[in-house]
Amino acid sequence: MHLTFLGTFIFVLGLTIEATNGRHSKAHDGFHNIEREPRWRNWKAHLRAHHEKHLS
């Protein structure tokens, strides 16, 4: 019983910290700038073209 409560408490606490941190909302402001975002900067041309076509 105590272990289940402790696990649930830690899980909810982690979600709360992540939600208040705002990390995801800061990274995604409604659109993606492929030139500025490091993980997308090195994509191959066909992947960038597909992404720009469908999500711009």
Image: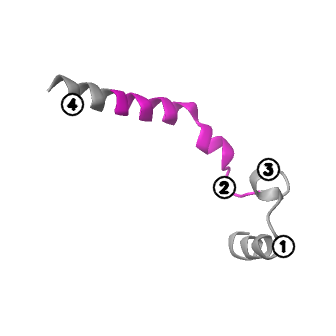
Q: CA distance from mark 1 to mark 3?
A: 15 Å
Q: Amino acid under label 1?
A: Ala
Label annotation for residue 38: 3
The one nearer the camera, 39 or 30, is 39
Region of the chain picked out in magenta, as a range: 10-32
The one nearer the camera, 35 or 39, is 39
Q: Main secondary structure of the magenta part?
A: helix
Q: Which residue is mark 1?
A: 45
- Relative to 3, 30 lies left or right: right
| Mark before the other along the chain sequence, 1 or 4 | 4
- Residue 37 visible somewhere in the drawing: no
**Which dot, 2 or 4, sits closer to the camera?**
4
**Which dot, 2 or 1, sits closer to the camera?**
1
| Viewport quadrant of the N terminus | top left
| Mark before the other along the chain sequence, 1 or 3 | 3
Q: Amino acid under label 3?
A: Pro
Q: Do the residues under discs 2 and 4 have CB atoms within 8 angstroms?
A: no
Q: CA distance from mark 4 to mark 3?
A: 40 Å
Residue 32, percent from left and from top: 73, 57
Label annotation for residue 30: 2
Residue 17, percent from left and from top: 48, 29
